[in-house]
Amino acid sequence: MIKGSLIPDDPFKHDVIFIEDKMGEFMRIDFLIARYKWELDAIRTAVRVDGIPVPIVTKPYLAALKLRATGYKDASDIVTLVHIMSKDENEKTLELAKQIGRDKKLKEFLAQLQEEPDEDLPEDLI
């Protein structure tokens, strides 16, 4: 467990629990301790996926979480997520971005998406 609230440059100020498989067989799982109403909404609207024992947040909420983060991987993930979202999911993402004060950042990412050539995404990214 990492106490994000004690890390000065943590964009979330959350306490986080990481579960990581040292053998590399399974993906790392991050558990954020919710601090905002929109994060609780993300948990409430999480969906069940066959073979995964915990509910997974939807793409718009995942994009919102990543908009709050500052890493290059998060920016890349947002572009990928937006590319595979439905129209309704895109609208929800824009709504969430505005709610969390990251709508300008999202628009910058969307502008980059418009500039990129339209090519199929690798199956493992979907």
Image (cartoon, rainbow, N blue to C red):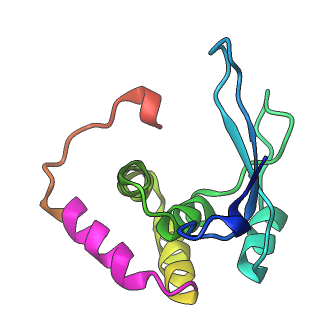
Magenta stretch encompasses residue 102: yes
Question: How many numbered circles does the render carry?
Answer: 0
Predominant SS of the magenta segment: helix
Kindly indicate the quadrant of the structure image that contains residue 6.
bottom right
Q: Nearer the viewer, residue 99 or 8?
A: 8
In the rendered image, residue 114, in percent from the top left (x then y), is placed at 19, 64
Judge whether 67 appears above or below 51 on screen. below
In the rendered image, residue 120, in percent from the top left (x then y), is placed at 27, 37
Residue at 67% of width from left, 11% of height from top? 23
Kindly indicate the quadrant of the structure image that contains residue 60.
bottom right
Q: Nearer the viewer, residue 55 or 102?
A: 102
Residue at 51% of width from left, 61% of height from top? 66
Q: Nearer the viewer, residue 67 or 126?
A: 67
Position of residue 43 in the picture relative to residue 58 (left or right): right
In the rendered image, residue 115, in percent from the top left (x then y), is placed at 13, 61
Judge whether 113 appears above or below 100 on screen. above
Judge whether 93 appears above or below 62 on screen. below
Highlighted magenta segment, given as a residue range: 100-113
Position of residue 18 in the picture relative to residue 8 (left or right): right
Kindly indicate the quadrant of the structure image that contains residue 75.
bottom left
Residue at 56% of width from left, 75% of height from top? 92
In the rendered image, residue 121, in percent from the top left (x then y), is placed at 32, 37
Magenta stretch encompasses residue 82: no
